[in-house]
Amino acid sequence: MIGADGTHSAVRQALGLDFPGYDLSGRWSIADVDSPDWRDPRLFQGFLLPEGEVCIVAPLERARFRVIASTADALAALPVPMNVSAVRRSGDFTISVRQVTRYTVGRVHLAGDAAHCHSPAGGRGMNLGIADAADLAGRLIDGGLPEYHAARQAEGAHVLAFSEGLRKAVQSKSPLRRAVMPRLMRMIAAVPPLRRAAMRYFVSG
């Protein structure tokens, strides 16, 4: 059996597995919107707001975007105008940072959010779950299931640490860090080898 049934996994709970970690304080929010004339529609854009808050705009389709903020209203947090012609969905949520103690118990294996969850920082959550599934599928075909836990637990721990480190950096209230982060992001975007390395990391995991 494969349990890939999300952060509130019934499979994980039935196995009696711990899901240690913590919840971040405050509410985050998301809005998927249509905006026909949004500036630079092909670019991922991040905004550092006062008091360590952040707002992110990610392109989904030609005129569709996902706005995520570390406040309770993503669209209200956006510090630049956005002409929204339709809101496809919106909501707020609490971010948890957790990882299951065992990915495998007998013939039951956990993958995706049933095994781990973290903040959107770094954009690795979906890719990490897909990588779990691909790794597990390969092991089901070729063997090697006994090593699944060790391989995916190590990668999950790495992504959780990376994601939290990045989140803390962009949400820092330190004037020095907040001055450095935009320059660092612009440098990565402007230097092709750095940009390609960042894209490979985020896309391939």
Image (spheres, helix red, strand yellow):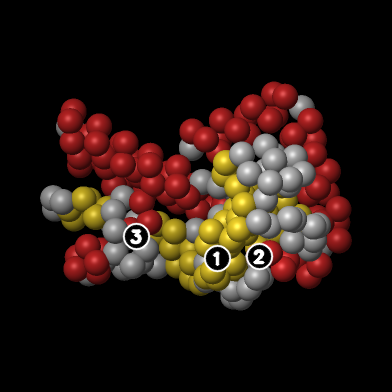
- Of circles 3 and 1, which is in front? 1
Q: Nearer the viewer, residue 91 or 138?
A: 91
Q: Residues within 10 Å of mark 1 (few under 14, many from 20)?
A: some
- Of circles 2 and 3, which is in front? 2
The residue to which callout 1 is attached is: 90
Give residue 105's mark.
none
Q: Nearer the viewer, residue 18 or 28?
A: 28
Quarter of image, res 31: bottom right
Secondary structure at numbered mark 3: loop
The residue to which callout 2 is attached is: 74
Q: Nearer the viewer, residue 186 or 173?
A: 186
Picture layout, residue 24 above or below residue 192: below
Distance from disc 2 to disc 3, alpha carbons, whole Å, reads: 23 Å
CB within 8 Å, label 1 to label 2: yes
Secondary structure at numbered mark 2: helix
The residue to which callout 3 is attached is: 6
Residue 23 location (% of width, % of height): 51, 72
Distance from disc 1 to disc 2, alpha carbons, whole Å, reads: 8 Å
Of the residues under marks 1 and 2, which one precedes in the sequence? 2
Q: Residue visible at 59% across and 68% down? A: 28
Quarter of image, res 18: bottom left
Q: Residues within 10 Å of mark 2 (few under 14, many from 20)?
A: many
Q: Residue visible at 45% across and 47% down? A: 126
CB within 8 Å, label 2 to label 3: no
Residue at the extreme left: 107
